[in-house]
Amino acid sequence: FGIRQALPEDCDGLYGWSQDPAVRAASIRTEAFTIEQHREWYARKLEKAKAGTLRWYILEEEITRPIGQVRYEKVVRGEPPWAGGPSAEEDGGAEISISVASGARGAGIGRALLERTEAMAKKDLGVERLIALVRPENAASISAFERAGYVYVRDEERMGVKLKRFERSWG
C-alpha cells in the first residue's frame, strides 16, 4: 500500500465513493449532493490544505488504485470544521473524516489508514489531539477507532445528529 496527498484529479472518484449508500448512511450529513456541489467543496478543502489547516491522505493499493481516504481538518476557532456545521468555539485538534472503497471494507483498511497517517497529520498540522465523530450505529468505524487507540469521550449532537466523540491525544 502507498500513501499520498489528495490531488485535484481525485475529486470525481471521491465523489463516487461518497455516493455509496453505506457511506451516505454513516456520514454526519446524509443528504444527497450534486457533483457540482462536491467539486466546489473539494476545491475549498484543497485550498485549506495549501493554507496548512487540512491534510488529506489517500491510501492506494498497487500504487494506482485508491482504496481509502482520510482527511484531518484543524479545528480553528470561529470556523466550521465541516460544511454546514457550527463554528468551532475554541482552537484545538483536528477532526477526522475517513472512508474506504466498498470492495475493500472489512479488511482493516480503516485502521491501517489511521495508523499510517496520524503521525503525518499531527506533525503537518501541529496538533496534539485527533477527534472522530461517529454515528452510534456505525459499528465498523467505532471498532476501527477503538482499535487504533481512540478513547470514547462523550456523546455530542451536531445539526440534530447524535454522535459519539472519540479522541486520541499525545501529551
Image: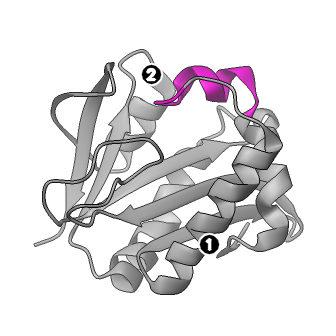
- Using residue 34 as the reference point, say whether residue 141 is left or right of it: left
Q: Amino acid at mark 2?
A: Ala
Is disc 1 in contact with disc 2, using a CB cutoff of under 8 Å? no
- Using residue 62 as the reference point, say whether residue 50 is left or right of it: left
Quarter-of-image position of residue 119: bottom left
- Near mark 2 (Cα within 10 A), the count class, few <14, some 14-19 or many ≥20, is few
Residue at image coords 46%, 30%: 28
Residue at image coords 35%, 19%: 136
Q: Quadrant of the N terminus?
A: bottom right
The residues bearing labels 1 and 2 have C-alpha atoms spaced at a distance of: 30 Å
- Using residue 159 as the reference point, say whether residue 152 is left or right of it: left
Magenta segment boundaries in residue numbering = 19-29
Q: Quadrant of the C terminus?
A: bottom left
Where in the figure is residue 23, as x and y percent of width and height? 64, 29
* Residue 146 vertical position relative to residue 155 in the rendered view, above or below: below
Label 1 SS: helix
Observer-side mark, 1 or 2, equals 1
Q: Looking at the image, can residue 144 be seen?
A: yes
* Residue 164 vertical position relative to residue 131 in the rendered view, above or below: above
In the depicted view, which residue is nearer to us: 157 or 164? 157
Where in the figure is residue 14, as x and y percent of width and height? 76, 50
Number of numbered discs: 2
- Near mark 1 (Cα within 10 A), the count class, few <14, some 14-19 or many ≥20, is some
Q: Amino acid at mark 1?
A: Leu
Query: Which of the two discs, 1 and 2, labels the residue nearer the N terminus?
Result: 1
- Using residue 86 as the reference point, say whether residue 23 is left or right of it: right
Q: Residue furthest top?
A: 137
Q: Which residue is labeled 2 in the image?
A: 139
Q: Looking at the image, can residue 104 be seen?
A: no
Question: Which label was assigned to residue 46?
Answer: 1
